[in-house]
Amino acid sequence: MSIKNLSMFGALLLTACVTINIYFPAAAAEKAADEIIQDIQTLEPSQPQSEMSPQSALPKWQVSVYQLVDQTISVFISSAHAEANLSVNSPEIRRITADMRARFGALIPFYEQGVLAIRADGLLTTKGSVPLKDRNKLSKLIAAENADRYKLYQAIANANGHPEWAAQIKSTFAQRWISHAQSGWWYQTANGSWKQK
């Protein structure tokens, strides 16, 4: 084998050694979905950020540096492992989940009346006859919630450096929204029929 062929073979071998296949972390996505949904569906007031974060005593520039290093390490590690953890901590994700948490209290009465239901794809829809006085309000709540759900899935995919994962994250969340439905809530099964928890 000539030196030229040997160096080409070496380069090919080196390339093969560093190729990493990134697979969608399904188990991590389920865990993340459960945590987010439980957080959204908690009606207790959340602690102020200053009490929650030990970094709050640090200067803002130092906190920013720590967050940047943490995010860089998370992206590098998640890129290097086939089954990585799913990062769900970004300013956009926190903003979206805060909006959803604030809206959840307004959705509960409609779930309990049986006029709000979870579709098989995890989005909300009306079920049955909505009283005339509530139609506009419920319609706006559903539109805002469904829009935020789409934004959340894309934000999680983007935060993990894989925008193409949004559809898989949506599918995972769809199952988990139904799993976290409370007693009496309506949901749609995969075959399109409706059931009540």
Image: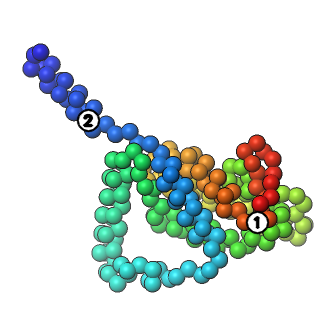
Residue 138 in picture, x, y percent from top left: 79, 65
What residue is shown at x 59% (from left), y 51% (from top)? 172
Mark 1 lies on a secondary structure that is loop
Mark 2 lies on a secondary structure that is helix
Three-letter code for the amino acid on which mark 2 is drawn: Cys
Q: How many marks?
A: 2
Q: Is residue 179 above or below residue 120?
A: below
Q: In front here: 143 or 100?
A: 100
Disc 1 to disc 2, how far (Cα)? 52 Å
Residue 110 in picture, x, y percent from top left: 80, 68
Question: In this figure, which colouring scheme has been used for the structure?
Answer: rainbow
What residue would you read off at disc 2?
17
- Image quarter where the C terminus lies is bottom right
What residue is shown at x 70% (from left), y 74% (from top)? 105
Q: Is residue 192 visible?
A: yes
Q: Label 2: how many residues lie within 10 Å, few (<14), some (14-19) or many (20+)?
A: few
What residue is shown at x 58% (from left), y 70% (from top)? 39
Rendered image: mark on residue 66: none
What residue would you read off at disc 1?
183
Mark nearest the camera among 1 and 2 is 1
- Image quarter where the N terminus lies is top left
Q: Is residue 26 left or right of residue 146?
A: left
Residue 96 in picture, x, y percent from top left: 57, 65
Q: In front here: 5 or 91?
A: 5
